Amino acid sequence: MSWLSLAYIAAVVIEQRYLNILGWVMITLMSAVLVAALLALAGPALEAMFNQAMDTVGK
């Protein structure tokens, strides 16, 4: 095997690892955006439910 083919194989492996890392970063960012959106939409309802539960326990 020549050094050129070894260099090509190394470049392919490095590119695959780099793209894999980019994929995980994208998944993490999309998950964070999804959580933030759900909190923005359901935040008041969750807060009211929590306060009602705390009032019930406090009685």
Image: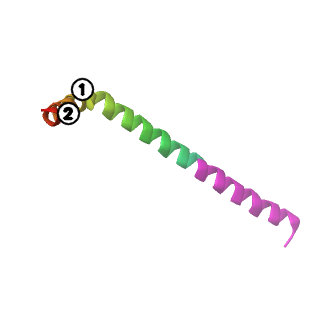
Q: Which mark is residue 44?
A: 1
Circle 2: residue type? Met
Kindly report which numbered mark, 1 or 2, lies closer to the viewer in this rendering: 2
Label 1 to label 2, Cα distance in Å? 15 Å
Q: Position of residue 3 (x, y in %)?
A: 87, 65
Q: In the rendered view of the protein, which quadrant contains the C terminus?
A: top left
Answer with left or right where residue 27 lies relative to residue 9.
left
Out of 27 and 43, give the one closest to the viewer. Answer: 43
| Magenta residue span | 1-21
Q: Label 2 neighbourhood size at 10 Å, few (<14), some (14-19), many (20+)?
A: few
Q: Which residue lies furthest to the bottom in this view?
A: 1
Q: In the rendered view of the protein, which quadrant contains the N terminus?
A: bottom right
Q: Label 1 neighbourhood size at 10 Å, few (<14), some (14-19), many (20+)?
A: few
Q: Residue sitting at 54 percent across and 48 percent down?
A: 23
Q: Where is residue 18 in the image (x, y as percent from the top left)?
A: 65, 50
Q: Residue sitting at 31 percent across and 34 percent down?
A: 38
Q: Position of residue 16 (x, y in %)?
A: 64, 56
Q: How many marks?
A: 2
Answer with left or right where residue 9 lies relative to residue 36.
right
Q: As displayed, is residue 11 above or below residue 38?
A: below
Out of 48 and 17, give the one closest to the viewer. Answer: 48
Q: Residue sitting at 25 percent across and 31 percent down?
A: 42
The verdict on residue 4 being magenta is yes
**Disc nearer the start of the sequence (1/2):** 1
Circle 1: residue type? Pro
Out of 59 and 34, give the one closest to the viewer. Answer: 59
Name the residue carrying label 2: 54
**Kind of element beneath mark 1:** helix
Q: As displayed, is residue 24 above or below residue 41?
A: below
Q: How is the image coloured?
A: rainbow
Q: Residue sitting at 13 percent across and 34 percent down?
A: 56
